[in-house]
Amino acid sequence: MASAAKRKTKTGAKVALVTGANSGIGKAVARALAADGYAVVVNYRSREKSAKATVEAICKDGGFAEAFQADVSRPADTDRLFAHIAETYGRLDVLINNVGDYLRKQIARLTPEDVRRMTESNYYSVVECSLRAAKLMRKQKSGRIVNIGYVYAERLQANPAVVAYFCAKQAVMSFSLSLAKDLAKYKVTVNIVSPGININSVEKPRRPSDQIPFGRFGKHADIVNAVFFFLKPESEYVTGTHMKVSGGHGL
Ligand SMILES: NC(=O)c1ccc[n+]([C@@H]2O[C@H](COP(=O)([O-])OP(=O)(O)OC[C@H]3O[C@@H](n4cnc5c(N)ncnc54)[C@H](OP(=O)(O)O)[C@@H]3O)[C@@H](O)[C@H]2O)c1
């Protein structure tokens, strides 16, 4: 697999890492990137079977991808992932920070451990991968980072039932803006794409129109479309922005 990856990059293919790409939004983005010619690293945490299925689907469509197990909220795992990328491909053109577990738990029952877990999953995963990617991208003087956020996170507001998730996603927003400012001189952009309630949401209202002005749940294709906007050569001047892809939910 490593030699196939090296051969692929020799053809001039760009390299993309999608975290948590074995299901949901991450999987859809990984498939779209591969269909667009990227060599894609399909990162996953535990479900190897679904990661392999993602890679197989990509290969069947004529693309190139490999699965790589790493819990990107952990430094040692993320080191291993980026050592592999540096050794195998020698570059990273696109990082999609997609990982982020969800927790609904009233603040009265919340434990510090819950908050730590949500913070590591949603925020540290972005920090762990972005700082390592930034090292490669600074050297390259190019690169695109897209962080998958949450539509409510840009506004300071009370949200006691999902506070741990909410705060972690707010940290992602703040971190993204600072990183965008720092990396702009290297022609590296950092942007945020925020879903509202997607079809794979763990918390869907019975009727979409109850909560979504547009009247339907978000599709993975809606998110993919937004991500691709930030990857276009013509979008090189767009950095530090937040794109809400929610059909009006959360406005
Ligand atoms: N779906 C929505 O409606 C919605 C709404 C707003 C925001 N979002 C955001 O969109 C992103 C994707 O959501 P989703 O619902 O599509 O996710 P999902 O279906 O739950 O998939 C997440 C994938 O990420 C992997 N993963 C989780 N933690 C990981 C870690 N530490 N390291 C590596 N892989 C890890 C999991 O792999 P394993 O199974 O192998 O553990 C899982 O397959 C998240 O950031 C989420 O907060 C989603």
Image (cartoon, grey):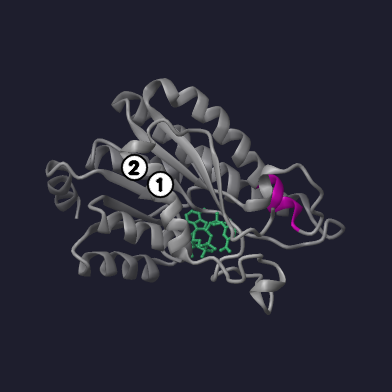
Badge 1 density bin: few <14, some 14–19, many ≥20, Cα 10 Å: few
Q: Quadrant of residue 135?
A: top left
Q: Quadrant of residue 47?
A: bottom left
What kind of residue is marked 1? Phe
Q: Is residue 106 left or right of residue 96?
A: right
The answer, for residue 113, to whether it is visible in the render is no
Instruction: Specify whether residue 167 is painted magenta.
Output: yes
Between 71 and 29, the residue placed more toward the observer is 29
Between 246 and 30, the residue placed more toward the observer is 246
Residue 131 image point, x, y percent:
46, 32
- Report the residue marked by disc 2: 232
SS at mark 2 in the image: loop
Give the residues drawn in magenta, as a range.
162-168
Q: Quadrant of the N terminus?
A: bottom left
Residue 190 image point, x, y percent:
47, 36
**For the residue with label 2, is its CB less than 8 Å from the closest atom of ligand 1?**
no
Residue at the extreme bottom of the image, as rendered: 206
What kind of residue is marked 2? Lys
- Report the residue marked by disc 1: 229
Residue 23 image point, x, y percent:
44, 66
Asked whether the beta carbons under mark 2 and mark 1 sit within 8 Å of each other, the answer is yes
Residue at the extreme top of the image, as rendered: 185
Badge 2 density bin: few <14, some 14–19, many ≥20, Cα 10 Å: few
The answer, for residue 225, to whether it is visible in the render is yes
Q: Residue at x 26, y 50 (%)?
A: 38
Residue 193 position (above or below residue 207): above
